[in-house]
Image (spheres, rainbow, N blue to C red):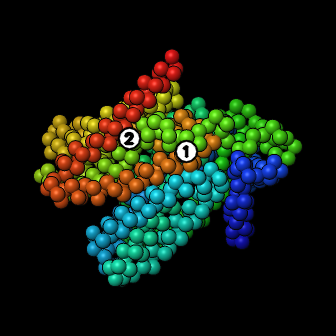
Amino acid sequence: MREGIGSVMHVASAAMASYRTDDPSLTAESRRAISSRQTALGTQPFDPRRSPFYYGWVIVIAGTIGAIASVPGQTAGVSVFTDDLISTTGLTRLQIAISYLIGTGTSGLLLGAGGRAIDRYGSRVVSLWATLGLATTLLGLSVIGPMSTAVGIIVMSAGFGCLRFSGQGLLTLASRTMVAQWFDRRRGFVTALSSAFVSFSFAAAPAVLLALIDIDGFRTAWRIIAVVLVVVVGSIIIVFYRVSPEAAGIEIDGRTSMPDDQVSGQHSERRSASVVGTDQDATRSEALRDVRFWALTIPVVALSSTATAITFHIVDLGSELGMTDAEVVRIFVPIAIVSVPVTLGMGWLIDRSTPLLIAVFMGVAQLVMYPTVGLLDTGWGAVAAIAAWGVSQGCFSALTSAAIPKVFGRRHLGAISGAQMSAMVIGSAVGPAFFALAQTLTGDYRTALWLSAALPAVGLLFAVESLRQHRRTAA
């Protein structure tokens, strides 16, 4: 046990000490020392170069497990505990929803810094701390009791914020970023495959979590999950996670292996200042000023906001349309059936074409999806909404996993992806509140659906213009 804890602290402290070597205030000697510490971590506790096959495939499995482990911080993992939290804290459903909004919004605001931390310390140490933070939050929430309204909202806002930041935010972002770092030619296919497994796991999560709750209540369920996170997921991160192929002495896509002296950084100065990417890779500020970033980000922000809002209010929306609860929730199964092959297809496409084309597809699909969701009570409306939602969801994975490194490079991938995810999380917090407000003012959800279509319409304009510029440059 002590050896395991010592291993955890060794990896964490060593990585935290490894500041980025592209800091202009560092001396050449400091850069070499930091580079040596960074690359040394890439061969601990074992050397990936000894693997009989490209180690990136191990990274795909480990990163997928890491993303699945974020379930307690995802909407699917939180929602099954809502009724227990209401009865335990004494807060109303609306007050719990307000706390969730505050916590999720705060998490989104902090994710930009989380993305920069991934670039600075590496996905391995950030994932480890995110896992420990998620487990600690679950243990803390497992001891809550009755509270006054003011105290309850503050406590639950903080709890939801920690759950969302560590789980939905950092652990997901770090794991996804690590997988994208290890592939170039097959990045789209690999990230699509990983996303398909994660999606199936998220779909199964509520049933698994409810089974845990049935054992001995929600407190025991959260404590069991916390132990699994620390012991199982923490061990996988320490043993198998690696920041990048370069840090492990392997060329990306497994083309060749670097010499030992180049990996150690002690006998060669040919190694670049940063362990990943090139000097031509865009920085976060450069990406945010590039219209292509917004062409890729606006569609996924729109879907995060509106799909979360629709899901959050799905029962009430169904009642408005004259549908029973069972009838309206059935749409999610065919949506998943449509989205999986589209996800794999978009992964194949992004390896062979510009991701701007996928952004165009997603924008068009959302413009069909939003109005037709308000027509789920009709046969043709339901078919159109399910198909368009499935296509939109299928495009989502490619634009959030493979698009950013393909367009902007890998050196500042954490910071740029963090900015994208920050916008997505904030959107998912605002969407349900916007739909509730629109329904209160207008008496139905159709107005909110039509107004929400404005955002993907703007994204589509950006994507078309960026695609036009791309083709002009390529010609």
Is residue 256 visible in this depiction of the protein? yes
User: To which residue does mark 1 refer?
Assistant: 285
Q: Secondary structure at mark 1?
A: helix
Q: Is residue 455 left or right of residue 347?
A: left
How far across and how far down the image is residue 380, in percent? 17, 36
Q: Secondary structure at mark 2?
A: helix
Q: State the image quarter where residue 312 is shown.
A: bottom left
- 422 on left or right of 61: left
Q: Residue at x 52, y 54 (%)?
A: 112
The residue singled out by tag 2 in the image is 299
Q: Which residue ends up furthest to the left in the rendered image? A: 322
Q: Look at 61% across and 40% down and name the residue there.
A: 410
Q: Position of residue 322 (x, y in %)?
A: 12, 52
Which class describes the residues within 10 Å of circle 2: few (<14), some (14-19), or many (20+)?
many
- Return the residue nearer the eye: 449 or 287: 287
Q: Locate residue 242, reporting x and y percent.
A: 66, 49
Judge whether 45 appears above or below 150 on screen: above
Q: Which label was assigned to residue 178?
A: none
At label 1, the amino acid type is Ser
Give above or below for 231 relative to 366: below
Q: Can the viewer see residue 326?
A: no
